[in-house]
Amino acid sequence: MERADDAGVYKVTDDIAIIQTVDFFTPIVDDPYWFGQIAAANAFSDVYAMGGVPKTAMNLVAFPLDEMDMSILREIMQGGLDKMKDADVVLVGGHSVKDKELKYGLSVTGFIHPDQVLTKKNLKTGDQLILTKPLGTGIINTAIKAGFASNEVIERITGLMATLNKDAAEVMQSMSPTLGRDYPVHACSDITGFGLLGHLAEMVVDSGLGIKLLADKIPILSETFKYAGMGLVPAGAKKNREFRETMVEFSPSVDDLLKDILFDPQTSGGLLISVDKEKADELVDELRKRGVETRAIIGEVSSQLKEKILVD
């Protein structure tokens, strides 16, 4: 509990540890089936970020039975179940309550070898940082709620949020000692509610190290700047900035809108992988071969920036 890791890990034997996590939230898209898909993908992400493989899940449901038809709940749960099948995860139960506000998510259990657990707090000087999904989902979701987003934008962002981090995680796992290779991935996190800079701050706290981000290398959904310029920045981004801005330094060339985007809370965001500099290009190439659409080297770990993040 002393560390802000993505999930809990319990060692069972010398060869097996279980990873446990739980996540649920209110709808972020209007389509109930896709809401179920997104919620499930989001819940699995913490297991992937720890280097593990999700194996079982239990549904968590809060449903306004008097206000909504049960067909909506069936579609949500079908979406979640289909995403579980994509992830090779078995549904083993769940729990539901009657509530005034609809909520859905999963409790997830995964497996990992105890010696291969990835945490946020194992950065190494010179490590390269690789991001596997573009930023902007919080701002674009705000634009969707306000009625400004086109159907094309809605379809794009929905598919992105419903995409599993499975392939990216398997590429990380393939670089393991069990396959006779070095294990150059030192730390990992998934980018979710605290935004990119918020999760990076968790990684550098008490590490003695800092991070330099390359502003022009960070992948961002193309519509994000437009909506941010319209003021459609969620309250969560502002809270994230207030909480962590003392740890962040921006070069004068960094656009003010980009600052908001880097604190933007993400839903089912990508993995942020800290990998040995000598293996970074190899990891990016492996991600490409596996069909991971976004695979950008966005910065590096520095011993000169003591628990600070420089965006340049």
Image (tube, rainbow, N blue to C red):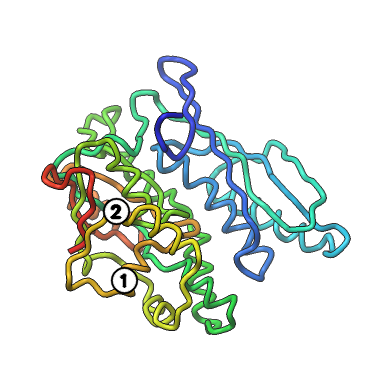
Mark 2–mark 1 distance (CA, rounded to whole Å): 17 Å
Furthest residue toward right:
66
SS at circle 1: helix
Name the spot of residue 166 as percent of width and height, x first. 44, 48
Question: Which residue lies under the disc numbered 1?
Answer: 258
Q: Relative to 258, is 207 above or below?
A: above
- State which mark lies toward you, 2 or 1: 2
Question: Which residue lies under the disc numbered 2?
Answer: 246
SS at circle 2: helix
Q: Relative to 139, is 44 above or below?
A: above
Quadrant location of the C terminus in the rendered image? bottom left
Name the spot of residue 292 as percent of width and height, x first. 36, 58
Answer left or right for 182 relative to 304: right
Residue appearing at x 29%, y 53% in the figure: 246
Amino acid marked by disc 1: Leu
Please rate how many residues cluster around mark 2, counting C-alpha atoms within 10 Å: few if below 14, some from 14 to 19, many from 20.
Answer: few
Image quadrant where residue 3 sits: top left
Amino acid marked by disc 2: Thr
Image quadrant where residue 245 sits: bottom left
Name the spot of residue 133 as percent of width and height, x first. 38, 60
